[in-house]
Amino acid sequence: MLGSVVGFLSRDANAAWNKSSGAVIETGVQKNAAYRIDIPADWNHGIVLFYHGYYVDEPGFDKQPLDKLKQDFVDRGFALLQSGYSDSGWVVDRADLETERLRQYFITSFGRPNETFTVGFSMGGTLVAKALEQSPKLYDGGLSLCGALMSSDEFGNRGFALRAAFDYFFPNLLGPLVPVPKDFQPDEKNETKVALALAQNPKAAADLASFFHQNDRKALAAEISFSTYEIKDLQQKAGGNPFSNADLIYMGTSDDDALNDGVKRYRADTNAALYLARNYTPNGKLLKPLLALHTTNDPAVPGNTSFAYALAVARQGNGEKFVQQYVKHEGHCSYTPEQVGVAFDELLEWTRHGKRPAAGALPR
């Protein structure tokens, strides 16, 4: 493991942090996964494990100041632990294990925390649910922000169905769907290509927007391009095509019959579909508090998809452990740092004092 440290701390594995250590920023690499640890000078002996979302490229870490959203956790007295994961894209199969390795390293280097929370955005929100379900003894609670709290195959097939519908209206524009070409990138070139096509066929654009619940044409073009990249990523990781629209009845367009008759149908490869289902299908076995926050108009991960997770938790007899709240805003993960702070403070009140947040709009 390679690492570097700003501030004073002992490298003795048995040494723990103390107030004389001052603020600490440590960056390094653990088994190909970059990491960063921030500890405030007035550390409250709590930690926040932060799961980032889906990245095209693996993020690295430097010692520059944190953005305000992350700094707010540190300002509340918590140590913030971030893993960049050892691969990019959809890494639900390993990101929780690599973040757990970082947690164990932290304990060895700085001492055992009194409180442990997990927070994540988008794919990271999925990982928050996975961590709480599979390792409840390690955490006091979690905050899922714009998280895909549904099975990975359900989430992935939504984008796959959109791209197949796009191909019906605009054949061959983006190349084959199964498999997506290895060199496809969600870059400006492909996004512009999609945007121009949508502009030239407003009726098709309106139908796709209606099906995908996205009224912003520019954002729709970006979603189609990015979904194509995600499809490629998971086809490669799964060793085949894990997606299917064979049994899907398309609804919500101006001519559903024409779309259903004309769209090309695909079936998933069995082993690839099993890979996607394993990584990850929530089971609802939630034993620690989980607060989920969504915007009301999120095209990538619609807020209403979390209701299925609420039902799964209720079926396990754990309904009191889950709360969904919303922010009246458009966009994926488009929160202010202040809104995230309010949600996190609610989670603290819930875990420390038993005050469960009210479902509905995030308090102002």
Image: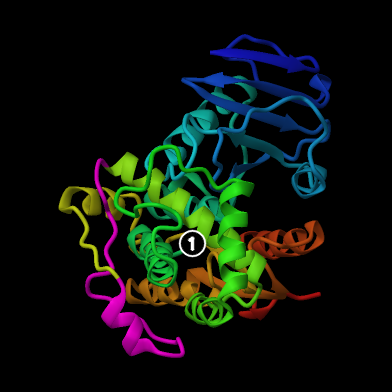
The spot of residue 320 in percent (x, y) is: 49, 74
The spot of residue 112 in percent (x, y) is: 58, 32
**Is 161 part of what is drawn in magenta?**
no
Looking at the magenta stretch, what is its main secondary structure?
loop
Q: Image quadrant of residue 201? A: bottom right
The magenta segment: 239-263
Looking at the picture, the colour scheme in use is rainbow
- At a point 83% along the width and 33% down the height, the residue shown is 65
In the image: residue 69, left or right of residue 219: right
- At a point 81% along the width and 25% down the height, the residue shown is 19
In the image: residue 72, left or right of residue 139: right
Of residues 9 and 272, the one nearer the viewer is: 272
* Residue picked out by circle 1: 148
- At a point 54% along the width and 50% down the height, the residue shown is 124
Of residues 51 and 58, the one nearer the viewer is: 58
In the image: residue 20, left or right of residue 355: right
Q: Mark 1 Cα within 10 Å, few/some/many (few <14, many 20+)?
A: many
**Is 241 part of what is drawn in magenta?**
yes
Q: Which amino acid does label 1 sit on?
A: Ala
Q: Is residue 331 visible to the viewer in this orientation of the structure?
A: yes
Q: Measured along the vertical axis of the image, is residue 209 above or below residue 70?
A: below
Residue extending farthest to the left is 270
Number of marks drawn: 1
Secondary structure, mark 1, is loop
Of residues 60 and 43, the one nearer the viewer is: 60
Q: Image quadrant of residue 61? A: top right
The spot of residue 259 in percent (x, y) is: 35, 81
The spot of residue 133 in percent (x, y) is: 40, 55
Of residues 173 and 117, the one nearer the viewer is: 173
